[in-house]
Image (tube, rainbow, N blue to C red):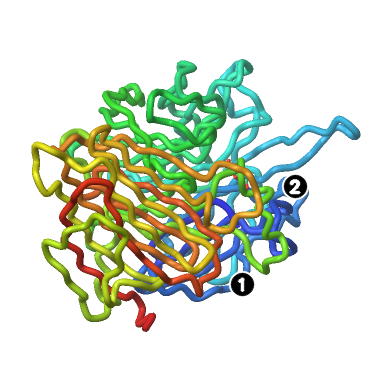
Amino acid sequence: MNDPNGFSYYRGQYHLFYQYNPYDTQWDAMHWGHAVSHDLLHWSYLPAALAPDAPYDSFGCFSGSAMELNDGRQLLLYTGVRKEGGDKAKEFQTQCVAVGDGVDYQKYEKNPVLDMDDLPEGLSPYDFRDPKIWRRPEGGYRCVVGARRMDKRGVLLLFDSDDGFRWRFFSILAENDGRLGLMWECPDFFPLDGKHVLFVSPQDMLPEGFEYHNGNGTVCQIGAFDEETGKFHAEFDQAIDYGIDFYAPQTLLTPDGRRVMIGWMQNWDTSKNTGYEDRQWFGQMSLPRELSIRNRRLYQQPIRELALYRGQPVEYKNVPVSECMTLSGVEGRSVEMDIQIRPEDAANPYHKFTMRFAQDDQYYSILSYRPHESLLKIDRKFSGSRRAYIHQRRCQVADRSGEIHLHVILDRFSIEVFINDGEQVMTATILTDPSARGISFEADGKAVMDITKYSLFSEE
Ligand code: FRU
């Protein structure tokens, strides 16, 4: 699997569709896989919702979104891709519609609903994809779609529709001035805490200091939307995730009004060659995360439903950490840990705090913090990988005089670290066998730690 698609609430449950190749663990022949959930954490698979079986989507049913129509049916708006041109065939990308009842979907007989004729002048028909739909408060629907200019720079287009089937161009919402990568994939656009937020997943980004290190990365822009002109004015931008594996996120609004995001927990540069091609699965989703804006930044928290699946807390306060140590009851591979780290003597902050996890006699991964530089690092180079691709990523965190608060969700094949109350998040996959359950701590210099650990989903 790759991108989340059609992440939505429909007829009393959450729906998550996703880019899906049923035939292999490599990307090909994109279908829409489909799963449903009542709590955003336990998912039941349904039959694939879309297969690339029509002339206009024979090369793939690419990413898109879902919406309940006024008549109660569920509409899927997706990118249909076809190839044309013999030996030098090119992909033509169009927007298409299917409607269904939450289980079975029929493609619309007049597909595609948007094609190259609907593009403003100067845009490429080969990169026009990933529509994200929402309902307008004043009636009708709007969607944002990724496109690009001939010079490869991403452009985001808004289209309007009264019924979800007939669409018309409204405006250019935002344009890449060349700073943030090239093509902008998988846009999402929504109001949040009095601002407007634009998510894009740009291809081929250049790093800026400690920001934007993933090549194909994620960007959150926070700003204002001009309803009249249909233009977004960004005031601030940041990476959505500072780890290694996070891309193409999509959000929904829960019935109780929370903006929740889920992302593909992978990265295109490493997903094609993992050394684990013999596995029966490849690709996974992040935890759903609740979003808010604080101090002009995007904050993320694991969805609160997770707290329903905690075991008994294992708690330690004021633990001095120096030589490598373990704590009784602190181990496992589906665990939540709330960790506060402080220098023992504020005038003399420790040089480095290290937590090893997914550890056995041979393998482990590391989360380490250097307070002098305010750098938090994820490192999986000793995790038992068979490939020499990127294994570490650093994140510059706020300087809090040597203190840091880490909320860690460790799962069988991943770690998600919510830093300083969700001000930043680092996500990485780890392929170490789940029997590696050790967790240990060490500090070069003296640090003091409070830790609360819960097993999740009755792991133990
Ligand atoms: C992003 C993406 C989308 C596209 C899909 C194809 O990861 O490239 O732009 O719709 O994957 O699977």
Occupied quadrant, residue 431 = bottom right
Look at the image and tell me in which quarter the C terminus lies.
bottom left
Task: Name the residue: 65% across, 43% down.
Answer: 112
Badge 1 residue CB within 8 Å of ligand 1: no
Q: Which mark is residue 59?
A: 2
Task: Name the residue: 44% across, 28% down.
Answer: 170
Task: Name the residue: 59% across, 17% down.
Answer: 121
Residue 369: x and y in percent read 30, 44
Lower position in the chain sequence, tag 2 or tag 1: 1
Ligand 1 falls in quadrant:
top right
- Would you place residue 244 above or below residue 10 in this image? above
- Label 2 vs label 1: CA separation? 20 Å
- Would you place residue 397 above or below residue 456 in this image? above
Amino acid type of the residue that numbered disc 2 sits on in the rendered structure: Phe
Question: What residue would you read off at disc 1?
Answer: 47
The residue lying furthest to the right in this view is 87
Occupied quadrant, residue 228 = top left
Q: Can residue 160 be seen in this view?
A: no
Q: In this view, does 437 lie to the left or right of 27?
A: left
Amino acid type of the residue that numbered disc 1 sits on in the rendered structure: Pro
Few, some or many residues within 10 Å of mark 2 (<14, 14–19, 20+): many
The residue lying furthest to the front in this view is 323
